[in-house]
Image (spheres, grey):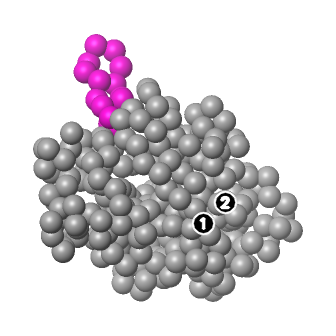
Amino acid sequence: MIGVRDLRVTFGAGRGPRVVAVDGASWTAADGRITALLGPNGAGKTTTLRAVAGLVAPDHGQAVIDGLDPARQPQAARARLGVLSDARGLYPRLTARENIVYYARLHGVDDAVASERVEALAAMLEMGALLDRRTEGFSQGERMKTALARALVHDPPNIVLDEPTNGLDVLATRALRSALRRLRDEAGKCIVFSTHVMSEVERLCDHVVVIAHGRTVADGTVADLCARAGTADLEEAFVRLAFDDSGAR
């Protein structure tokens, strides 16, 4: 389970104005479900996910991973979390296998177990042919598969993805959707991802959180959000919920 409780994060120092990136957001993502964070640019989605990952410290409130606060218990919380950020950050001179095993070692995974996990993930992500190639020159889809395998190598129960389909072609996007469904349905993972693509939300997500002005303005199923906004179209529902001043309060 991943959640944030009255989370507030600000940036800025010295005499300049402080920027409020997240302003009291609260939401919960349950195990065995895929939860989407929807919001316009600057709404606070990425900052919220960075707080969940323990990369930024909140000014108020907290993020929670299976009852653990990543700001106070970073190692224990990160052991239960896999993160796929928009910046893939692969080591280009290493092969895909070496990239994945390196991260397994950082998480304290035994080499024998890591080797088994690499093979299992390669089968699930259909990337067996990539394993022993250097990642330098990989396509966006190949990089995504490698980065996702790296994020999953320690078998975390919770997964966070920040706009994972950016730059992916149709086949790579379909492969990612298939992988996320399997992780949800077969492994019962708690999956949270931010996106601007409404079709991804409609095809994948069990729960949707709409964020605007750093705050949670609506949450529920796709049907719930459409009913609340009075429209059958998710994109129109999102616009009404995220940009209606009355809904943002």
In the rendered structure, which disc, 2 or 1, sits on the residue that comes first in sequence? 2
In this rendering, would 196 be left or right of 114? left
Q: Nearer the viewer, residue 163 or 32?
A: 32
What's the amino acid at mark 1?
Answer: Lys
Screen quadrant of the N terminus: bottom right
In magenta stretch: residue 146: no
Disc 2 to disc 1, how far (Cα)? 8 Å
Tell me the residue that label 2 is attached to: 156
Q: Are marks 2 and 1 in contact (CB under 8 Å)?
A: yes
Asked if residue 166 shows in the view, the reply is no
Which residue is painted at 22% across and 66% down in the image? 227
Q: Which residue is mark 1?
A: 189
In the rendering, at what x and y percent does residue 74 appear? 64, 38
In this rendering, is residue 190 above or below 205? Answer: above
Q: Residue at x 44, y 62 (%)?
A: 35
| Local SS, label 2 | loop
Membership of 21 in magenta stretch: yes
User: Magenta stretch?
Assistant: 10-23
Crowding near pointer 2: few (<14 within 10 Å), some, many (20+)? some
x, y percent for residue 78: 64, 47
Q: Quadrant of the C terminus?
A: top left
Residue 134 located left or right of residue 8: right
